Image (spheres, coloured by chain):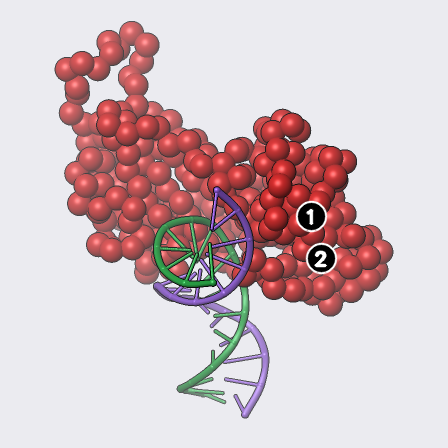
Chain colours: A red, B purple, C green
Amino acid sequence: MRILAAWFGSHREPMKTSPHIQEKALTGAKFLRVHRVGKHIVCDLSGAVPEPDRKSAESGPNPDLQWIVHLGMTGRLLVTHSAAEVVAHTHARLTLEDGREIRFVDARRFGRLELRDLRHQQAFQGPGSEPLTIAPRDFHALFHGRKTSIKAALLNQNLLHGVGNIYADESLFRAGIRPQIRASRLTRVQLERLRVALQQVLAQAIQLGGSSVSDYVDANGVKGFFQLEHRVYGREGQPCRDCGAAIRRIQLAGRSTHFCPACQR
DNA sequence: ACAGGCTCCTGCAGGC
DNA sequence: TGCCTGCAGGAGCCTG
């Protein structure tokens, strides 16, 4: 699918690459593949101008561009008809050859748009490890000697990418671990429980379409349902579903943190 | 090197 | 009814 035109409305944030460069590079480029790296959506593209030294077409076109979208808190990547009403906070529009448009909408501007030219830059990998596939040994090694709280460590994208505030709280609850505990003090058994819990939480959240806490919707405008599975997040004062104790909320690592004082030790 | 705090931004909820 | 304040969060930046 080819991009006929690219329009970037905002000329400051939320751009990581200048809007002018993105408009120019994306116009005429062709989508090859869209995949996920942590919290980033990575679009592999072949550029508009063929490179003389590009490998022959035998093995299919190789991507030479990547458009990387981070949704932040409130960012949305929508697929619409090009005639559809342009809602407020639309920062980018890509017009496709079939008459549809890909639109990036982000009220709070916490999202980020970046373009990589793979002829000069490395493909986007993300800084941390992928929590869904990380091996036990590698997972344990991440927290070895780390003096910060396990909650803060889970949120550190340089260690694990893709773990946000909700999923950190939910996986710590399922593993029975208190968020304030120093990461380095966790035993191997606890860390393994945490790794398994984190993978279960993330897999279930992905399956249910994410957590629609306020106005989150996916590319088709569909809400997620993982919020119905929350055991601690957003449940301050309510009884724990396992033991009945009141869920507590504290500030940790600058984020609201929810836990059950009885189940998590 | 690492840890923690501040900042960005806007919609929404709650209080007066 | 309407205004004002505070809160939510990811990640980059700054400070200790």
Q: Are marks 1 and 2 in contact (CB under 8 Å)?
A: yes
Q: Residue A265, labelled with which disc?
A: none
Rendered residue at 31%/36% (across/down): A67
SS for dot 1: helix
Horizontal arrangement in the rendering, residue A2 relative to residue A206 (left or right): left
**Which residue occupies the foreground of this view, C15 or A234?**
C15
Q: Residue A259, labelled with which disc?
A: 2
Identify the residue position indicated by label 1 in the image.
A172
Rendered residue at 35%/28% (across/down): A123
Rendered image quadrant of residue A49: top left
Query: Are dots 1 and 2 on a single chain?
Result: yes
Q: Quadrant of the N terminus of chain A?
A: top left
Rendered residue at 44%/55% (across/down): A74
**Which residue occupies the foreground of this view, A253 or A19?**
A253
Q: Is residue A61 visible?
A: yes
SS for dot 2: strand
Whole-percent x and y of residue A204? Answer: 64, 39
Under mark 2, the amino acid is Phe
3D distance between C-alphas at marks 1 and 2: 8 Å
Question: Few, some or many C-alpha atoms within 10 Å of disc 1 (few <14, some 14-19, many ≥20)?
Answer: many
Under mark 1, the amino acid is Leu
Of all residues, the one furthest to the right in this rendering is A243
Whole-percent x and y of residue A152? Answer: 58, 51
